[in-house]
Amino acid sequence: MKVTVECDCTPAEARAFLGLPDVTPLNEAMVAEMQKRMTDNVAAMQPEELMKTWTSFGMQAQDQFRKLMEAATKP
């Protein structure tokens, strides 16, 4: 026997029906806090520091990749 049930409801209605809490205010607060922190961090970073961070990470990644390849080619 095969039974198909189709529910036409919004996500908020489904959460309420299943007894799940409404986390909309919490989600909005978290998103606002993340936006504030990201804005503060971007404003604090100077272009020179940003490029220095990106370049040093790139060099470290290249060195690690080279070492990985050297280790793989050794018998």
Image: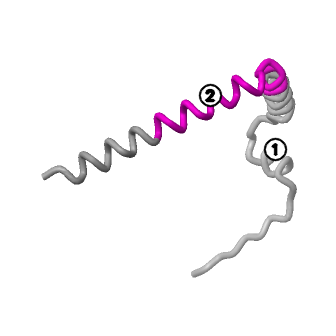
On screen, residue 74 versus residue 55, left or right, reads left
On screen, residue 62 versus residue 25, left or right, reads left
Q: Most extreme residue toward the bottom, as rendered?
A: 1
Q: Is residue 29 visible?
A: no
Q: Quadrant of residue 57?
A: top right
Q: Residue at x 22, y 53 (%)?
A: 73
Q: Residues within 10 Å of mark 1 (few under 14, many from 20)?
A: few
Q: Residue at x 59, y 34 (%)?
A: 55
Residue 39 covered by magenta stretch: yes
* Amino acid type at mark 2: Thr
Label 2 belongs to which residue? Answer: 53
Q: CA distance from mark 1 to mark 2?
A: 46 Å
Label the magenta part by its dominant secondary structure.
Answer: helix
Find residue 49 and name its label. Answer: none
Locate residue 70, reporting x and y percent: 27, 47
Locate residue 21, reporting x and y percent: 77, 35
Q: Residue at x 82, y 36 (%)?
A: 22
Q: Residue at x 55, y 30 (%)?
A: 56
Label 1 belongs to which residue? Answer: 16
Locate residue 71, reporting x and y percent: 24, 46
Q: Which residues are magenta?
A: 38-61
Q: Callout 1: helix, strand or loop?
A: helix
- Which is more foreground, mark 1 or mark 2? 2
Foreground of the two, 2 or 46: 46
